Amino acid sequence: MNLLADAFAWLSAPEQWSGPNGLQHLLAQQLYYTAIAVAIAAVIAVPAGWAIGHTGRGKEIAVAFAGAARAVPSFGLLVLLVLLFGVLHKPEAATVTFVILAIPSLLAGAYAGFEAIDRRVVDAARAVGMTEAQILWRVEVPLGLPLLVGGFRSAVLQVVATVTIAAYVNLGGLGLPIITGLSLRRYEVVLGGAVLVALLALVLDALLALAQRAAVPRGMLAAQGQHVTGPRRRLGPDPEPAT
Amino acid sequence: MIEFRNVTKRFPDGTVAVDSFDLVIPSRKTTVFVGSSGCGKTTLLRMINRMVEPTSGTVEIDGEDVAAKQAVALRRSIGYVMQNSGLMPHFTVAENIATVPRLNGGTRRAAKARALELMDVVGLEASMADRYPSQLSGGQQQRVGVARGLAADPNILLMDEPFGAVDPIVRAELQRELIRLQQELDKTVVFVTHDIDEAFLLGDQVVILAAGAQRLQVGSPSEITERPADDFVAAFIGAERGKRALSVKQTPNGPVLVDAEGRTQGVLVEGGA
């Protein structure tokens, strides 16, 4: 318990929240890397997932790719990419690592969202004379949104936790107190950093859970008796394939 | 007038859903395709609005080949009502009904007015306009589906087993409403069902189909009942036993008609039609 008390004492000390390596600065770096990585991953994975979901083609390739991407250990990849890109391009190497981490969840969320839509609804949309673009934007995207947000939620959580390793290649973030604490054998600092990462993840998860709930179209809420809970939380990165 | 000319549909897996089919569907009448499941009746229906493309042969509307028209524009010009209503779950009732007018560039206000007008036509309370399909009963959802089919005032209305998923009482009610609507609106209705009673009730022209969309008999309900083309048709319509197999029974008050189960179905009136 002493260690925990020390960790909180360290966290609440005013000197930790000032200067160039102040915790607010590290927190901002952590969020910055997360935001950039998830945004880039979304630009790649969401259109790809929608294309797979809309056409029903290419799912096997996506599943194989996502499986492979999930199997890659992020830390090993980061070190490898830093070696490949050269030490001057460490931020790029870190960003690519986190983008690869975020893609599988977003891809799965995008196509699973479309797959979960009743085929008869899409057929009806086509039969009344919607163009393919109208089917996509007016039917598939709104109805697939809850699962996409679920995939986004998984991606953000995985990335925000993993960005911690950026400190190993001198890129800052909340991993910095963890690794410096380890080398200095100051475990209250390690624990303080870890607690901060965990709190950040919990806060983001709660916010995104609300977003996921808000993403359910109103007519679908009515179908489930006015109030609805989002897909069950899972530790794995898959969003639930069916609502 | 809709005309099928030597239409064949072979699906990629090799099944022949429709084999050399010819038919003329007269304008402003109700034509019913009836047959057991898998006979190709829905495939025939969906060829009219190009939801299915024939492998060979042509489908013409008023002498124009549908394949020459743009599919999206064609579909917007033809009403389509399907089983389980096919409503958009995230659109309100009014938005569902006004789908096609909105796609055709109508204003939100005009579309809402049109939706309310059609809700009145199909017997839905205006207060339901802002509800979602999941908040309606099956019968109400079908009425919304019919209203959506009518929204752009199409000449042709395609109905694919629209009343298949509702209970018998609601189905009878919807069938009566459709007959009333057809008397008022005078559309060319093409209706698909597996229920011969529904076919005889609604159809001016009934097309009895067997696997591969093979035409067993085409005619009015009276023609088919009076002169079934073969034993299969006679069995299918229940002319040998069932409710269309009536026999005369003499009673002290005059002759009556009884069905195969011995239940009295009506009184024989001399000099009737």
Image (cartoon, coloured by chain):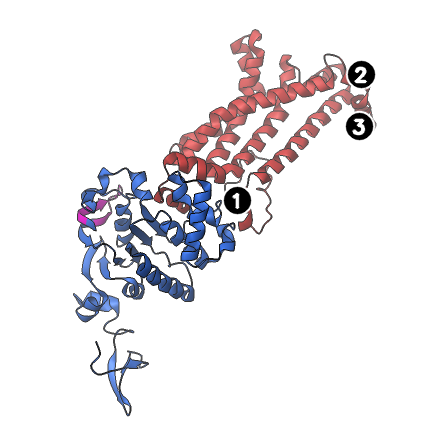
Chain colours: A red, B blue
Instruction: Say which quarter of the image contains residue A135.
Output: top left
Q: Is residue A137 magenta?
A: no
Mark 2 near mark 3, Cβ–Cβ under 8 Å? no
Q: Residue at x 62, y 37 (%)?
A: A210
Give the number of the disc on residue A15.
2
**What's the residue type where badge 3 is placed?**
Leu
Check disc 3 and report its element: helix, strand or loop. Answer: helix
Left or right of B102, for residue A83:
right
Left or right of B69, for residue A234:
right
**What's the residue type where badge 2 is placed?**
Glu
Q: Residue at x 29, y 64 (%)?
A: B196
Distance between mark 2 and mark 1 Cα atoms: 48 Å
Chain of the residue on which disc 3 is drawn: A
* B257 or A146: nearer the viewer: B257
Residue B127 placed where, x, y %?
A: 52, 55
Give the number of the disc on residue A243.
1
Distance between mark 1 and mark 3 Cα atoms: 40 Å
Residue B86 placed where, x, y %?
A: 41, 49
Span highlighted in magenta in the image? B4-18
Looking at the rendered image, the disc whose residue lies closer to the viewer, 1 or 3, is: 1
Q: Residue at x 22, y 79 (%)?
A: B272
Residue A220 placed where, x, y %?
A: 52, 46
Instruction: Say which quarter of the image contains residue B175.
Output: bottom left
**What's the residue type where badge 1 is placed?**
Thr
Residue B168 placed where, x, y %?
A: 40, 66
Kindly identify which residue carries mark 3. Answer: A4
